[in-house]
Image (tube, coloured by chain):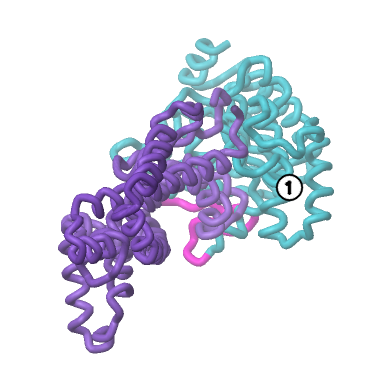
Amino acid sequence: MNGTRPIIEISNVYKFFGQLQALNDITLTINAGEKVVIIGPSGSGKSTLLRTINRLESIDSGSIVVNGKDIYARGSDINVIRQELGMVFQNFNLFPHKTVLDNLIMAPMKLKKIPRLEAKKLALNLLDKVGIKDKANVYPSMLSGGQQQRVAIARALAMNPKIMLFDEPTSALDPEMIGEVLDVMVTLANEGMTMVVVTHEMGFAREVADRIIFMDRGQIVEVGTPKQFFTQPEQPRTQKFLSQIL
Amino acid sequence: MTQKGVQTVVKINIGDGAAIPCKKDSGLFTAWWLTFLGAIAIIIYLCVVEPEPYWRILTFLPDGVLVTFQVTVLSIILSLMLGFITGLGRLSRNRVFNLIASTYVEIIRGIPLLVQLFYIYYALGRINLFQNLPPLAAAVVAMGICYGAYMGEVFRAGIQSIDKGQTEAARSLGFSRAQTMMLVILPQAWRTILPPVGNEFIALLKDSSLVSILAVSDLLRRGREFASESFLYFETYTMVALVYLVITLFLSKAVSKMEQRLNYYERD
């Protein structure tokens, strides 16, 4: 991978949902080009952690520096920072009133002032890459779940982000559609994109991750390479979790 | 809607105004057609069989219809503007803005429209600047302020009906709050907002008959003028009622057509 320049630096982050401690002293550094997969039981705080990286959640203390900018600092322009961060959601969240193509060109045109023709060319390339160029002019409701999620990935890529965040991208999909979405993600990983992925797909984690992070009850319990993680987990909680899912 | 991740459209039902016909009952023998054709038939029958006084009444009313439309359209424009601001205010994280909008809604909803009309009309009269305000303008202001509060609730509900994921997706791409509202939320919310707005429009048209007490010569007032001269109360109000009925039915059809067109991106 390309060097060890830290691109996401999470330091001592705490977050509470009322009484519930969602994030408990999280410290984690992710380097440019690294693929990090976060796993853990539901309610462990993994999605919350991912969402704090582009400030979709507030935090109660600590700091998160993305690409050299403290995103929770007063005066930092989150709208600019977010352009560097692509986000893919469990429920796709495509804009249903826009065609697939318009979903892709909207942000580059409005935010980066890219001329329509150029944005369109870029969008069609991306749709080609995710394998649904022929659906450019249909509305999202005409697509299957797998197709919608691939469009959502392309939409995030259209802003040419440095980092891609995936929040359980295959959890809302029918089983036969999971593969097509994971294939796109593997391609992206092989191209050197920095990726942070919350997922239950252990096969993907094993194949793609540089590091696997196991979370439970708002804490990072264990960090390791896929090999270490799946063959010799150190913590009893990790061992218990793996014995339940594998 | 069977696809995961695609929002279902929430219908806001405000039980006022004429029923808006939906796609399902589009046959010839529907309540709408029955009432519409029935009303037209009765008007024609009365005018042909008894042109005196019915035809004379009918030809006396159009001026009033025009004024009724004037009051309705101007009030709806004012109330849409107020409603949009109020709806955003009710959802705003700015405490002051939120409180002002909510208080406005509370006050307006707690006072009968007729009382508001009287009050605003005479209150405006007390302000020097507005002393020579024509009755029509006063009526529009009063109706607009009143319906603005109801519109505000419609806007609020419409905006809230859009899935939070839409906001998150737009914000994640780098859109600001305002851009997200204008480009993503409102274009979708409009579909939810339109039917109740259409309903309010029809309700407002009917309520506009109240402005006849403010010396605005709308449809009802024209009727009263005719009746008090001719003493033909029953005949006049029969005609007035029929004309109102035809207008509101016509409008409810128009709203339902518009509603269907707004659903262009929905899979059937």
Of B104 and A2, nearer the camera is: B104
The residue identified by callout 1 is A158
Of A165 and A150, nearer the camera is: A150
In the image: residue A30, left or right of residue A193: left
Chain B rendering hue: purple
Q: Quadrant of the C terminus of chain B?
A: top right
Tell me residue B144's x, y (percent): 33, 64
How many badges with numbers are in the image? 1
- In the rendered structure, which amino acid carries the disc numbered 1? Ala
Tell me residue A62's x, y (percent): 45, 51
Residue B58 placement: quadrant: bottom left
In the image: residue A207, left or right of residue A13: right
Q: Mark 1: few, some, or many residues within 10 Å (few <14, many ≥20)? A: many
Q: Is residue A70 visible?
A: no
The residue segment tinted magenta is: A60-75
Tell me residue B194's x, y (percent): 46, 47
Tell me residue A238's x, y (percent): 51, 20
In the image: residue B253, left or right of residue B122: right
Q: Which subunit holds the residue at mark 1?
A: A
Of A194 and B28, nearer the camera is: B28
In the displayed orientation, state which residue is furthest to the bottom.
Answer: B128
**Which residue is rendered at x = 47% and y = 38% of the image?**
A48
Query: Does A7 appear in magenta?
Result: no
Q: Quadrant of the N terminus of chain B?
A: top right
Of A154 and A1, nearer the camera is: A154
Chain letter for the cyan colouring in the rendering: A
Q: Is residue B45 visible?
A: yes
**Which residue is rendered at x = 76% and y = 38% of the image?**
A136
